[in-house]
Image (cartoon, grey):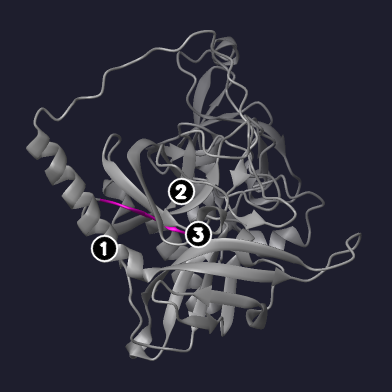
Amino acid sequence: MWKRIALFGLVLAGAGIGGFLAVHISPKLTGQATAQSPSISTESGLRQLGNHFELVAQKVAPAVVAIEATKLAVPGKSKSSEESGSGVIIEGESGKNSYVLTNNHVVSGASPEQVTINLADGRVFRAAQIWADPESDVAVLRIDKGGLPTAKLGDSDKTRVGQWVLAIGSPFGLNQSVTHGIISARERGQISLGGSIRIKDFLQTDAPINPGSSGGPLVNMDGEVIGINTAIASNSNTNSGVAFSIPINLVRKIARQLLEKGVVNRGFLGLHLAPTLDPADALRLGLDHSNGALVETVYPDTPAAKAGLKTGDVILQLDGTVIRNENQLINLISSRPPGERVKLHVWRSKKMYEVEAVVGDWRQAQTRLKTTSGQ
């Protein structure tokens, strides 16, 4: 299930010499509501909060690295390019190796010997190996050195809108920069990143993130990594208070498959979904809400076609999970192993139907489908 959405342009927050990937937002609202933030009433309270920020930064910053990647020249370019970003070291196996989590767009196009990892204490290493998943923009780098500072991974499913977070990275090449903010929203997926990125389920934060911050950690007040900073929404290619991080639970799952299998296995059905289900369309179809995923195309000889799904169907549930939008359905199906049978609740001709489908293998399907816009 791939989609044709571009709600606004997005900046992948890696900083390359030739530019970086960014998203541009054009506000459509004519006015803005303002809200007073709860204030800490005493100077002592402010000092305590500041001290806590300091402790969290001291705990995590030693594990945050700056990454420099030299990328080979591509057709139409006369020379190689440089990309800078960030990363965070996590514990390796048996203390023999260390692993760095970062974004694929920071290191894509570079071989391991062309990737330099700069630690907070000044030590410099070459990446020994790179695993990458372009569809989620997650990459893992191996360092052949144990005993390095590591960060603890948290549980991103427990993040709450409004909770304090810190973002640590190397914006504009300024290593070990720490910014603070809150979780602004969860489960953001209706954003267009272009390229190969199609697995999108972001934490939104207003912690300032800028070019070069890509791959750095988003950290909760327990000093746990809850996200990997990836993109910003901006009209100027710099921080505008709207940034996106890949939830660490998703990163952990992808990293585990990359390290164990070298690739990420994903399921697919063979549908093209509408970017949104407009309220007017929902009413026309006989629905009293605009939740669900509207089917625009069913590709032939796919699991969706074999299950009898049709253009105009609205998928409302998957195995009992209510579907909010097409992006959620993409992520849910992608996370299912090929061969698994799923039950869909489908709205068709103003009636509810149950449809069973067998999830297909996305990697195999890519060699057969003419377009990557299907899921």
Percent position of residue 62, x then y? 34, 70
Q: Is residue 305 left or right of residue 154?
A: right
Q: Is residue 338 visible?
A: no
Q: Residue furthest front?
A: 43
Mark 2 residue crowding within 10 angstroms, few (<14) / some (14–19) / many (20+): many
Residue 217 located within the stretch drawn in magenta: yes
The residue wearing badge 2 is: 245
Mostly what secondary structure, the magenta segment? strand
Sequence-wise first label, 2 or 3:
3
What's under tag 2, amino acid-wise?
A: Ser
| Quadrant housing residue 80 | bottom right
Q: Is residue 97 above or below residue 271?
A: below
Sequence-wise first label, 3 or 1:
1
The residue wearing badge 1 is: 58
Foreground residue among 285 and 115 = 115
Q: Secondary structure at mark 3?
A: loop
Q: Is residue 259 above or below residue 272?
A: below
Percent position of residue 324, x then y? 45, 31
Percent position of residue 370, x then y? 82, 52
Q: Are marks 2 and 3 in contact (CB under 8 Å)?
A: no
Foreground residue among 137 and 120 = 120
Residue 309 located within the stretch drawn in magenta: no
Work out how far the residue at label 2 is from the one at label 1, CA to CA, in angstroms: 21 Å
Sequence-wise first label, 2 or 1:
1
Q: Residue at x 63, y 31 (%)?
A: 235
Q: Is residue 203 visible?
A: yes
Q: Which residues are magenta?
A: 216-220
Q: Residue furthest top?
A: 30
Mark 3 residue crowding within 10 angstroms, few (<14) / some (14–19) / many (20+): many
